[in-house]
Image: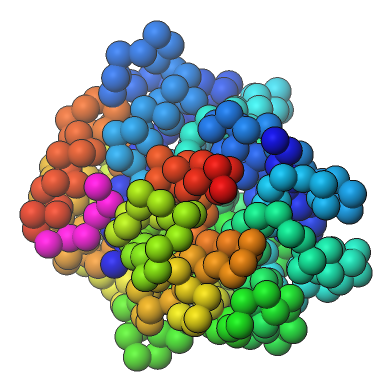
């Protein structure tokens, strides 16, 4: 039976994971390779590395980091942040990434989704969507949630799928960082209308939240950052809990 | 021991190289006929689209080369599908090593089943096989929209929408639909089993 996936997300700057990762005491706490290996051992099903570097030099460092992760980590990983072209995608996949996540650039140029799918296959193209519930409707935002786009979440998610996205990574900005649970209603709606997997992000604070995102939210995977990095939730214990709630997970 | 990884127009070939390196095996990524023929083991990996991969292999003559190899060969993902008779993906005639036609998943009976089949699923042995030695019912990582139905060459099954071939074996040819190079410790064990054949 296909397992529900648990995905820790790591922010990377200049090739190092940034702040707030004390999930295990490492010699070098900011080394993405060591963290990736530790998460793999701890039972994570996939990893996401988001490059938050702005500079050109930093981007080159990120590609180098991707290569080191691919050499050393034995589970799939997605990379995102600042990907704007098919060439960027090619560089990251050649370095060993399994999938790429695109967000603002896809909204700006939806054709990019079709181009990535056409060149590398649907399975590599994760379309990340940040949305907020505004006046009774879920609306998409870009630039870390600062800039409204006028696009409706459900319309955009459907368009992304039709253009060749392999997965949708939906972050509820209303729920992100609050740790009061995922946006299960919106997730359930996405899952019922899409035929591609949906990764839930934003709001996971307790093990019950993860249970609910898979049952009420019908998500295929759940992504979180700080609850894992700060060891507030141990992945192995989370999986035991989910399993005891009849949710199929890899253990 | 020399291990050749066949280089062609499919993605993710280096992931296999890295995974072999993690278990202490230095492989060569190559499309050179002599190197492939003389290797002790050959890996035929890939992520991609069947018809374009098949026409590339044909153009280079790699399809005939692979079919006639005598040493252990391991096909991975699209590699497995190209070793079958035919694929619905691009309606293409494939190598015909395994006696089965590759089909597209059909979720019309259950819309909750997403396509691609993506993520970790269990693999159950149906016949004893050295590739799966010490493993039964373990999770491995899958990413695919097409599958080889269960057939006479199936040695392990996975169930998603329908039971399908997770592992095929015929003579010196082995193939897995999942990605051992991305399947954690279980995947490394399978690669080690292959190297030890």
The residue located at (47%, 41%) in the rendering is B188
Judge left or right: residue B57 versus residue B141. Answer: right
Q: Nearer the viewer, residue A76 or A63?
A: A76
Q: Can residue B173 be seen in this view?
A: yes
Residue A4 located left or right of residue A144: left
Q: Where is residue A146? Give x, y as percent.
A: 44, 44
Residue A220: in sight, yes or no? no
Splitting the image into 4 quarters, where does residue B76 fall?
A: bottom right
Which color mode does the image show?
rainbow
- Whether residue A108 is situated above or below residue B68 in the rendered picture: above
The x and y percentages for residue B149 are 49, 82
Against B192, residue A118 (above or below) is below
For image coordinates 53% across by 69% down, the residue present is B168
Image location (x, y in percent) of residue B124:
34, 65
Q: In this view, does B94 lie above or below B184?
A: below
Q: Is residue A58 above or below residue A186?
A: above
In the image as oriented, which residue stretches furthest toward the top?
Answer: A27
Tell me how many marks there are: 0
Q: Magenta includes B140? A: no
Left or right: where does residue A93 sit relative to residue A188? right
Location of residue A176 by image quarter? top left
Q: Give the range drawn in magenta.
A: A246-251
Closer to us: B47 or A8: B47
- In the image, farthest residue toward the bottom: B109
Q: Which of A122 and A134 is in front in this view?
A: A122
Image location (x, y in percent) of residue A142:
49, 49
Quadrant position of the N terminus of chain A in the picture: bottom left
Q: Which residue is drawn at 57% across and 63% down?
A: B175
In the image, residue A247 lies in the stretch drawn in magenta: yes
Magenta residues: mostly which secondary structure?
A: loop
Instruction: Look at 58% across and 21% down and name the residue there.
Output: A14
Q: Considering depth in this image, is B88 or A35 the residue closer to the camera? A: B88
């Amino acid at each position: 039976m296909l397992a529900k996936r648990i995905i820790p997300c790591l922010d990377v700057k200049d090739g190092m994971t940034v702040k707030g990762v004390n999930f295990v005491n490492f010699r070098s706490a900011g080394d993405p390779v060591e963290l990736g290996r530790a998460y793999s051992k701890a039972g994570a099903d996939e990893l996401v590395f988001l490059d938050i570097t702005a500079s050109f030099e930093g981007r080159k460092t990120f590609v180098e980091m991707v290569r080191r992760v691919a050499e050393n980590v034995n589970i799939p990983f997605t990379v995102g942040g600042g990907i704007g072209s098919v060439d960027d995608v090619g560089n990251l996949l050649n370095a060993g990434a399994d999938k790429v996540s695109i967000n603002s650039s896809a909204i700006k140029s939806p054709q990019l989704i079709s181009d990535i799918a056409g060149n590398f296959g649907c399975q590599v193209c994760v379309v990340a969507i940040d949305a907020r519930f505004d006046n009774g409707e879920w609306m998409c935002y870009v630039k870390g949630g600062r800039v409204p786009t006028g696009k409706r979440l459900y319309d955009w998610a459907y368009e992304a799928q039709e253009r060749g996205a392999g997965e949708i990574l939906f972050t509820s900005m209303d729920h992100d960082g609050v740790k009061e649970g995922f946006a299960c209603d919106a997730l359930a709606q996405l899952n019922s209308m899409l035929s591609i997997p949906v990764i839930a992000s934003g709001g996971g604070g307790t093990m019950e939240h993860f249970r609910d995102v898979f049952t009420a939210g019908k998500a295929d995977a759940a992504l979180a950052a700080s609850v894992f990095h700060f060891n507030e939730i141990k992945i192995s214990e989370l999986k035991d809990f989910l399993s005891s709630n009849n949710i199929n997970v890899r253990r | 021991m020399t291990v050749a990884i066949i280089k062609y127009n499919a993605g993710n070939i280096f992931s296999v190289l890295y995974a072999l390196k993690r278990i202490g095996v230095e492989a060569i990524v190559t499309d050179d006929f002599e190197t492939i023929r003389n290797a002790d083991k050959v890996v035929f990996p890939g992520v991609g689209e069947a018809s374009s991969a098949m026409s590339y292999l044909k153009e280079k003559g790699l399809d005939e080369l692979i079919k006639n190899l005598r040493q252990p060969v391991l096909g991975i993902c699209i590699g497995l599908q190209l070793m079958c008779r035919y694929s619905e993906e691009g309606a293409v005639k494939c190598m015909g090593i395994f006696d089965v036609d590759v089909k597209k998943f059909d979720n019309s009976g259950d819309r909750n089943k997403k396509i691609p089949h993506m993520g970790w699923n269990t693999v159950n042995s149906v016949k004893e096989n050295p590739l799966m030695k010490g493993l039964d019912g373990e999770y491995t990582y899958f990413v695919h929209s097409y599958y080889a139905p269960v057939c006479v060459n199936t040695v392990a099954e996975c169930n998603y929408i329908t039971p399908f071939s997770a592992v095929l074996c015929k003579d010196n040819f082995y193939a897995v639909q999942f990605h051992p190079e991305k399947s954690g410790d279980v995947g490394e064990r399978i690669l080690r089993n292959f190297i030890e054949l």
